[in-house]
Image: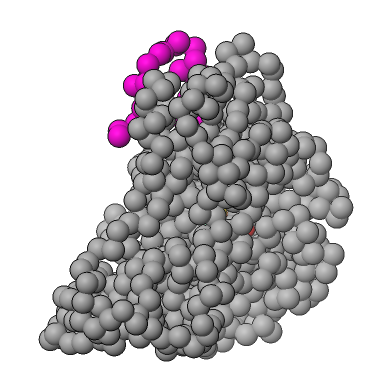
Amino acid sequence: MLLEQPGRLGALRLKNRVVMAPMGTNYSTTDGLSTERDKQYYAERARGGVAMIMTEAMVVTEHARPHHNSLCCYHDRYIPGLASLVEAIKAHDCKVFGQLNHRGALLRRSVLNMEPVGPSPWVNPNTGDQVRALEPREIKDIQALFVDAARRLWVAGYDGVEIHAANGYLFQQFFSPRVNHRTDEYGGSIENRMRFLLETIDRMRDALPDLHLIVRLSVSEFAQGGYSESEIIQLALALEQAGVHALDLSGGSNESPQLSKHCIQPPSFPRAYLADFARPIKQAVGIPVLAAGRLVEPADAEHMLSTGSADFVSLGRALYADPHWCLKAFGKIQAPIRQCIACNVCFERLTLEKDVACVTNPLIGTEFESLEHAEPQLFRQTSATGKRVLVLGAGIAGMEAARVLAGRGHVVEVWDKAASPGGQVHLAIAAPDKKEVFPAWTYRWLSASREAVPVRLETEAARDSIEAFAPDFILLATGARPGPVPMDISRLSPAIRVTHAWEALASLEDIPAGISATIIGGGMVGAEVADALRLKGASINLVELRPEIALGMARNNRFELIERLIAHGVRILTNCKIKGIHGAQLDIEQEGQGPSRLAIGRMLIFATGPRPNLEALQMVQSTNIPYARIGDCNMPGDFLSALRDASMTALSLDAYAARKVSGRSAMQTAA
Ligand SMILES: Cc1cc2nc3c(=O)[nH]c(=O)nc-3n(C[C@H](O)[C@H](O)[C@H](O)COP(=O)(O)O)c2cc1C
Ligand code: SF4
């Protein structure tokens, strides 16, 4: 495997070709100090086998903070925390670089009242904030801030520094002819647009001659009027000439979801998306090139190397999803990789100022994220407290709990009424672009199968069969079911077929091509049903009470979906109240418009909230065996909530067992 080969970066020897991409976490304190939490998060990824970690974008001035809890590096007080972080990473034979950034025009007033500044007056397209053009004196000051921050990283023990000149931030803003309209020595010709970055590098190299330096660039802005391929190659060559040790290639600009999808790609984008864009740059320079972008499985990463597109792969979300990706890819531990499903919930959370979480990795950012907890079967001793656990429901939550419990030495069985396992997973992958979600399920299924967990399908749980199995604990993971129709449809024409979104997704092949349909509820599920019907040439109305559709979806993915729906001619009615149903029409009232009527078409689909499926609850309670509800049968939500419920509850079972708690209230969640 090329990925396993050692490589050189300047004077550094990297033990393999896998580098962890810089990714914000919001795990530091509100003052920007490194915490035990980010130490554990990074150390686990170092332990997982990557050759080098690029810590997340760090703040070089208190006037340019991107998030409430991002790591900062603008004062010497940050050095002890960073030194301790470096030590934790290096303990695993892993190199560490720190990324330094200034967001410039993409600073947000809504976050700590940061003032957006850039090469020229502009409007931050994300927020509408006015951008003030920097004075030449301020440019020099910012260069000095970068040098000071680099010195702190050097003192803290970092092997090197990465300057973030990609993804639409300040350095890219200066390089972009689209954004930079200056008429002084920092604008106009390409030499002038490169000047801000090249001067910063000169100053850094003068101050810290032994420092290893990488620059991150976007291969393209993917925007009209952005820099050209020949210009980015010219910049790459100038950076090499300036003594930079490597280039790290990304794409796009985080100024809008339409452009940031080229940086943090949705599932509709091909794997190894940036390979073809990176190759000409790599071929032009002699220094090593790192490249990121939808490298999900080892084969994607191998493709980057074998096609000559990069010397090192930069893995981002793949390592949120599975810190032990390398150990698994290299066969050093025998367990399936927990694959990133490109849902972009991680990024969405950061944008919303939450800490990073991962849908398929429920332990990220918690003190439980170690190999021992994530893959307990690798460490199993026959547990003295080994308990018999019955899991009712073979959906994603049930199977996650089952694999963790079996791995920890408990005797587990899974029962499900259905003829096939998976619960609602099949619905989750029915919409276009959702195939990538499937690995969230296969990882659980494969892991439980390797543990030989018995899964009894078409098995109705009854009191006597449960008592015969004699479990110490029961986990109810029976999922959710469609909620009742939320309005009076007694006057609806009988010619119109009424169905729930889940039923529609489950039987797409039975829906005639070109059908006309109205979907009530434009949340994520309603929008996905519209997307699926679009492919059948349907003419669709999508009616939503709130001001926007697909609000539960991460924005990079959501904007893509909305663009597809609009291009197909889906009629999207937001801020729209339904007043009644008569015959073949809906009485509606859209905000700012008077009452009107909408022809429903041949199908009326309700994409309105599901309810927990509690049909087995009373019977389980009657056994007086301790139980807990997990996943949708606890509270309908998403994979993230289902998997967190499942893994945390499974991990808590040993504590219950140790305390010898009896009676059904021991693990009961709110009924
Ligand atoms: C939540 C999140 C935070 C990110 N933060 C940064 C960052 O601080 N600096 C940076 O250069 N790129 C950042 N990125 C981009 C990644 O480094 C990477 O280039 C991108 O996610 C594509 O690679 P992947 O498909 O392997 O995730 C971030 C990505 C995500 C998902
Ligand atoms: S949250 Fe989604 S996109 Fe982000 S790493 Fe996890 S699976 Fe991948």
> 322 or 39: which is nearer to us?
322
> 322 or 280: which is nearer to us?
322
Left or right: residue 405 compared with residue 607: right
Instruction: Tell me which residue sits at (37%, 41%) in the image.
Output: 614
Does residue 566 appear in this view?
A: no
Instruction: Tell me which residue sits at (60%, 28%) in the image.
Output: 412
Q: x, y percentage for residue 585?
A: 25, 84
Q: x, y percentage for residue 592?
A: 15, 83
- Total count of labels: 0
Instruction: Tell me which residue sits at (45%, 27%) in the image.
Output: 463
Displayed-image quarter of ligand 1: bottom right
> 279 or 375: which is nearer to us?
375
Q: x, y percentage for residue 487?
A: 22, 67
Instruction: Tell me which residue sits at (80%, 74%) in the image.
Output: 283
Q: Is residue 666 magenta?
A: yes
Q: x, y percentage for residue 64?
A: 38, 58
Picture layout, residue 645 above or below residue 359:
above
Q: Quadrant of residue 252?
A: bottom right
If the image is split into quadrants, where does the C terminus sit?
A: top left
Colouring = one colour
Of all residues, the one furthest to the left in this rendering is 594
Q: Is residue 69 magenta?
A: no
Task: Give the magenta range.
Answer: 648-671
Q: Quadrant of residue 86?
A: top right
Picture layout, residue 212 above or below residue 626:
below
Picture layout, residue 345 above or below residue 53:
below
Q: Main secondary structure of the magenta part?
A: helix
> 217 or 663: which is nearer to us?
663
Left or right: residue 349 compared with residue 426: left
Left or right: residue 472 compared with residue 518: right
Picture layout, residue 331 above or below residue 665:
below
Does residue 382 appear in this view?
A: yes
